[in-house]
Amino acid sequence: MMETVHVDLGDRAYEVRIGGGLIARAGEEIWELLRRPRVAVITDENVAALHLATLEQGLTKAGIEMTALVLPPGESTKGWPQFTRTVEWLLEAKVERRDIVIALGGGVIGDLAGFAAAVLRRGVRFVQIPTSLLAQVDSSVGGKTGINTAQGKNLVGAFHQPSLVLADTGVLATLPARDFLAGYGEVVKYGLLGDPIFFDWLEVEGTRLAAGDRALRQKAVVRSVEMKARIVERDETEEGDRALLNLGHTFAHALEAATGYSDRLLHGEAVAIGCALAFDLSARLGLCAQELPGRVRAHLQAMGMKSSLSDIPGDLPGPERLVALMGQDKKVVDGRLRFILAHDIGRAFVADDIDPAVVTRLIADELPR
């Protein structure tokens, strides 16, 4: 059963359609957007092996011609070389401003393909077909696109809203357990930042959801998308409330940079650790009850997720270096680190007056000895 979340952004409004079998029905779902029956698909090798044929069949059934570019998998794809390759391929494929680019994949493909669409011919429309839990609940919604650089994560990009998002919850069954749980880190984030009832529900149903219950998975995706849509509607370009969606991300982006954007630490895993650290920092500053960090970590551990710096394999840089990496984060304002902290489960807020020395001490205490 498909459910729809509307993202109300005036003349850039769009729908997020959520349910099983949407990739196979993609042709009929996107037909209304097309000005000619032709699309360009960006995907990666892993996703292509699992889902590209299904997408092509669905498009062909609706009379839509498809051409596809298959990129290497992994976070390292989200950089200048593959971005340049993608833009040049789209130009060689003679993609016009009236055409549709389809991003078929997880957050890496969605971010990169969306950014390519944003700059191609000064902006072409694109459709997100997210195939990972992380992309379905977070990166496919809201129009943030971009790539990583040597200086940090997502430092080059654009706000470019999709014309449609098709979140096929059936494909979540094809995800490796680690990838699913990494995406669950973003699901937990929504409860922690703004919906204590949702977090309570996750504490009860999370293990069944992870074990494969499709109804619970769809409910979690729908609620996460609803929360993100309402925040994006209030603050599309992250001038205010949208910053709350970065709960855990200041820590997470530094950890990803420190581990070389590699499989040592997936983005959702870094976010989960970052959320736990954000509650640790909040408790250390006397902003929330001392038992809350333990509750957050207990749920992450019950789900079999990474929850602390000691869960990251290999050596990490010292605390001073990690704080320096945070200084490259997009959320830095006037040279001051900006954190999303919390007064309680579901009561997050933006703080930009945190002493870096406090953060350095926290990390030093958390690093394995």
Image: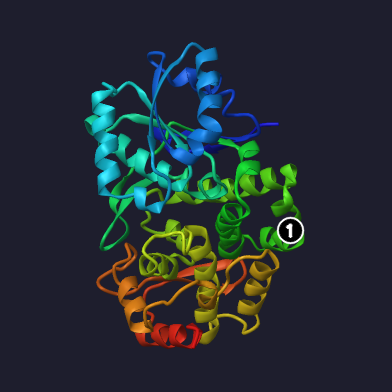
* Of 169 and 341, the residue lying toward us: 169
Say which amino acid is labelled 1: Thr
Residue 334 on image: x %, y %: 25, 71
Residue 241 sits in which quadrant? bottom left
* Of 230 and 41, the residue lying toward us: 41
Q: Name the secondary structure under disc 1.
A: helix
Q: Using the image, determine if residue 150 lies above or below residue 117.
A: below
Q: Measuring 56% from the left and 51% from the top, which residue is drawn there?
A: 227
Would residue 143 be seen by someone viewing this image from the given angle? no
Q: Using the image, determine if residue 278 lies above or below residue 35.
A: below
Residue 189 on image: x %, y %: 56, 61
Residue 103 on image: x %, y %: 43, 35
Q: Using the image, determine if residue 177 lies above or below residue 327.
A: above
- Is 134 left, or right, of 200 in this rendering? left
Crowd rating for badge 1 (residues with CA inside 10 Å; few <14, some 14–19, many 20+): some
* Of 173 and 133, the residue lying toward us: 173
- Is 220 left, or right, of 43 in this rendering? right
Residue 115 sits in which quadrant? top left
Residue 223 on image: x %, y %: 63, 48
Q: Measuring 32% from the left and 21% from the top, which residue is drawn there?
A: 98
Quadrant where the N terminus sits is top right
Count of numbered tags: 1
Would residue 162 be seen by someone viewing this image from the given angle? yes
Q: Using the image, determine if residue 283 lies above or below residue 327.
A: below
Q: Which residue is mark 1?
A: 207
- Is 330 left, or right, of 340 in this rendering? left
Colouring scheme applied when the structure was drawn: rainbow
- Is 91 left, or right, of 346 in this rendering? left
Q: Measuring 28% from the left and 23% from the top, which residue is drawn there?
A: 93
